[in-house]
Image (spheres, helix red, strand yellow):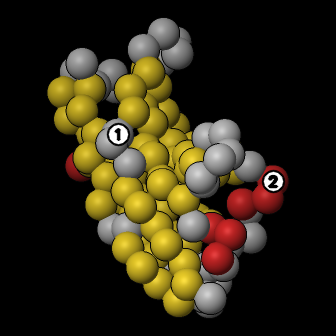
Amino acid sequence: QVQLVESGGGLVQTGGSLRLSCVASGNIDSINALGWYRQAPGKQRELIAESTSGGSTNYADSMKDRFTISRANARNTVYLQMDILKPEDTAVYYCRYTDYDGEHIFWGQGTQVTVSS
């Protein structure tokens, strides 16, 4: 089992920034991926970005310009820097852990981000 705890969400005005954090604990493989997803009301959950323990990153095309993922392997923590936020970024943001072969996937409880116009 892997536990994920997100933090950093909240209410921000259009054009503002937020930095989300996700701390992983438990039975963590040395080779893994930590990623950020979001789900807006009435929409499917979508990938924002993913970062592997080996240092590679993968972004959804629409997220590259304003979102930056980073991680601190020693602390099993992944971050999501979000800039120039827009009302359409309002969603619940989830952290996801995937082990080395993708067999085990765990999700955090999510953190709400609300961008006011």
Residue 108, label in figure: 1
Answer yes or no: is residue 81 visible.
yes
Horizontal side of residue 35 vs 60, given as left or right: left
Q: Is residue 114 above or below residue 77?
A: below
Label 1 sits on a secondary structure element that is: loop
Number of residues whose C-alpha sits closer than 10 Å to that of mark 1, classed few (under 14), some (14–19) or many (20 or more): some
Quadrant of the rendered structure where residue 87 is? bottom right
Query: Reading the chain from its start, which is encountered first: label 2 or label 1?
Result: 2
Q: Residue furthest left?
A: 26
State the separation of the CA atoms marked 2 and 1. Answer: 23 Å
Horizontal side of residue 66 vs 102, given as left or right: right
Residue at point 45%, 46% (across, down): 94
Answer yes or no: is residue 72 visible.
no
Q: Position of residue 83 (x, y in %)?
A: 59, 79
Label 2 sits on a secondary structure element that is: helix
Q: Is residue 17 above or below residue 64?
A: below
Q: Could you tell me which quadrant the N terminus lies in?
A: top left
Horizontal side of residue 98 vs 83, given as left or right: left
Q: Could you tell me which quadrant the C terminus lies in?
A: bottom right
Give the residue type that dot 2 points to: Asp
Q: Position of residue 13 (x, y in %)?
A: 53, 89
Give the residue type that dot 1 points to: Gly
Q: Residue furthest right?
A: 61
Q: Is residue 60 above or below residue 30?
A: below
Residue at point 54%, 78% (across, down): 115
Residue at point 81%, 53% (across, down): 61
Horizontal side of residue 95 vs 73, given as left or right: right
Between circles 2 and 1, the one closer to the viewer is: 1
Residue 61, label in figure: 2
Q: Is residue 73 above or below residue 85?
A: above
Quadrant of the rendered structure where residue 7 is? bottom left
Residue at point 38%, 26% (across, down): 106
